[in-house]
Image (cartoon, rainbow, N blue to C red):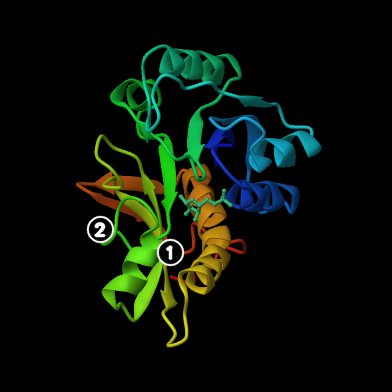
Amino acid sequence: MSRLHLGILGSGAGSNMQSIMDAIDAGTLDAEIKIVMADVEGAKILERASKRGIKAMHLDCSPWKTKLEGEAEDRCIEILKREGVDTVALAGFMRIVKPKLLAAFPQRVVNIHPALLPAFPGVAGWKQALDYGCKVAGVTVHFVDAGTDTGPIIVQKAVPVLDGDTPESLHARIQIQEHLAYPEALRILASGEWRMEGRRVRYRDGAGTEGGRSSM
Ligand code: GRF
């Protein structure tokens, strides 16, 4: 076991960060959130973090709109390192992270994506799945690599698409699974009982579950 020292990057509501905080508070995830940064000023994720007494700050990423690069990337890395972060969790961070950040935290940058990758990478994965006519949608927690939503998969959870689903209703049901999947993936990393075999992330059955028994 090795306690995770998390740095969380987000852009929006921060419900995934909330699920991570809740797991820590419940004693089911051995981690500490060192810093939360958002590229959007006043984002709710910052408010949630501050309320819990976690250091939270706006990270100005201009002039870029869709990526974290250049001076902002340097600043981000410097802050993460200074705060003692060893694992970076992207939680609704609406920017592409670049190789410099990935190199600063090798195999230690993870992301949550609201679709069953490799299907529907990019924006609004749940809506892509619905529009495509999928009967099953879901969520993926994965390591981040140089591509967009292409890194090795740690945890996936499936969610049925119902007849009457709208993008909003499907996303809401996917988010319930997100809030289970992210703590589960982080528990696997904290357990230390995982390894990479090619693209496959292998771990002991149950390494991610609260009581040591796997639901996967
Ligand atoms: C989630 O649907 C996540 O999968 C996606 O962005 C959304 C973030 O939600 N990457 P929140 O800010 O964690 O509530």
Q: Is residue 208 visible?
A: yes
Q: Amino acid at mark 2?
A: Pro
Q: Secondary structure at mark 1?
A: loop
Q: Nearer the viewer, residue 69 or 180?
A: 69
What is the total number of numbered labels drawn onto the structure image?
2
Q: Amino acid at mark 1?
A: Asp
State the CA–CA distance, disc 2 to disc 1: 23 Å
Q: Is residue 52 visible?
A: no
* Residue sitting at x 54%, y 63%: 175
Horizontal side, residue 31 vs residue 152: left or right: right
Find the residue positioned furthest to the left.
198
Q: Nearer the viewer, residue 108 or 101?
A: 101
Horizontal side, residue 116 vs residue 12: left or right: left
Q: From the top left corner, tell me how far across and down residue 122 is, in percent.
A: 32, 50
Q: Nearer the viewer, residue 78 or 148?
A: 148
* Label 1 Cα crowd, 10 Å radius (few <14 / some 14-19 / many 20+): some
Quarter of the picture containing the C terminus is bottom left
Q: Is residue 30 above or below residue 68?
A: below
Q: Which residue is mark 1?
A: 205
Q: Is residue 44 above or below residue 83?
A: below
* Residue sitting at x 52%, y 47%: 186
Q: From the top left corner, tell me how far across and down residue 161 is, in percent.
A: 41, 80
Q: Which residue is mark 2?
A: 118
Q: Secondary structure at mark 2?
A: loop
Q: From the top left corner, tell me how far across and down residue 199 is, in percent.
A: 22, 49
Q: Is residue 186 above or below residue 85?
A: below
Badge 2 or badge 1: first in the primary sequence: 2
* Residue sitting at x 42%, y 11%: 71
